[in-house]
Amino acid sequence: MNNFSEIANFIWSVADLIRDVFKRGKYQDVILPFTVLRRIDSVLAPT
């Protein structure tokens, strides 16, 4: 459960960072593309 709390805290910290830059209703327009980019980065890391 500790790992879950760390992940949740990280996600909230990212939301705090973008709070002043993006409107609340537009978070999904930002977070989804960055999630996809991070996933691609993780998959390509060994190459």
Image: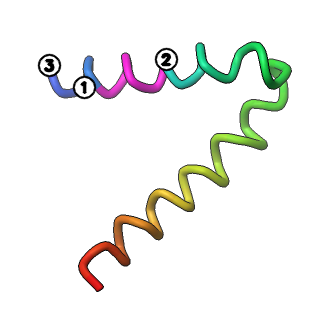
In this rendering, the answer to whether 19 lies above or below 46 is above
Q: Give the Cα distance between marks 2 and 1.
A: 12 Å
Nearer mark to the viewer, of 2 and 1: 2
Q: Quadrant of residue 41?
A: bottom left
Residue kind at label 1, given as amino acid type: Phe
Residue count near mark 2 (Cα–Cα under 10 Å), binned few <14, some 14–19, many ≥20: few
Image position, residue 9 (x, y; %): 37, 16
Q: Are marks 3 and 1 in contact (CB under 8 Å)?
A: yes
Residue annotated with mark 1 = 4
Residue occupying image coordinates x 85% and y 20%: 23
Q: Nearest the camera: 11 or 45?
A: 45
Q: Give the Cα distance between marks 3 and 1.
A: 5 Å
Name the side, left or right, on which 19 lies relative to 22: left
Residue annotated with mark 2 = 12
Name the side, left or right, on which 4 lies relative to 9: left
Residue occupying image coordinates x 31% and y 73%: 45
Nearer mark to the viewer, of 3 and 2: 2
Name the side, left or right, on which 4 lies relative to 10: left
Residue kind at label 2, given as amino acid type: Trp
Residue occupying image coordinates x 74% and y 31%: 27
Residue annotated with mark 3 = 2
Residue count near mark 1 (Cα–Cα under 10 Å), binned few <14, some 14–19, many ≥20: few
